[in-house]
Image (cartoon, rainbow, N blue to C red):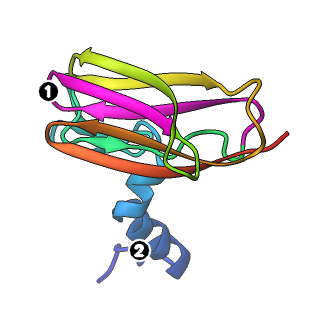
Amino acid sequence: MEGTARPSSSQRARNAFADSPSSRAADRYGQTAAGQFIVGTTAVEENGLPLTYTFEKNYPNPFNPTTVFRFALPEQTHVELAVYNLNGQLVTRLVSENRLPGVHEVSWNAHGLASGTYFVRLSMAAFTRTQKIMLLK
């Protein structure tokens, strides 16, 4: 083994982390596999189209009074994004339209609403997710 340097334990740990899925998710725009990238927590192809449906956590959360919802569509589809109160009553419908494939962001200003917990639901033909959000004033 003459002339071959053995990596230190810290170098081996860095190399192991660099190849792990968590490091790829932590790298906002890192390449994950041939032709795939992470944008936020959404895996996308080199052409920018998402691989799967995703609905990321809103940011910020808790919020006052504005927050942003981010979702990804691998194909064109009808999208509904709506906010409900704890009683299940519709507070507002933010999106109800056909959207092209890609990563989308929708901003919501909850000015005039009471502080508290709300639910936001993203639904389309092949995917439905509900998240809890918190408005603090």
- Closer to the camera in the image, 25 or 118: 118
Residue at 51%, 81% in the rendered image: 9
- Which residue is pictured at 41% across the width and 66% down the height? 15
Residue 48 in sight: no
Residue 28 higher or lower than 1, as above or below: above
Q: Determine whether 85 is above or below 96 in the image.
A: below
Q: Residues within 10 Å of mark 2 (few under 14, many from 20)?
A: few
**Split into 4 quadrants, where in the image is the N terminus?**
bottom left
58 sits left or right of 62 in the view? left
* Residue in the picture at 75% in, 30% down: 65
Q: Please report the bounds of the magenta region as a residue range.
A: 63-83
* Res. 113 in view: yes
Magenta segment, prevailing SS (helix, strand or loop)? strand
Label 1: which residue?
75
* Left or right: residue 13 compared with residue 127: right
Pinpoint residue 51: horizontal percent, then vertical percent.
18, 39
| Residue 42 image point, x, y percent | 34, 41
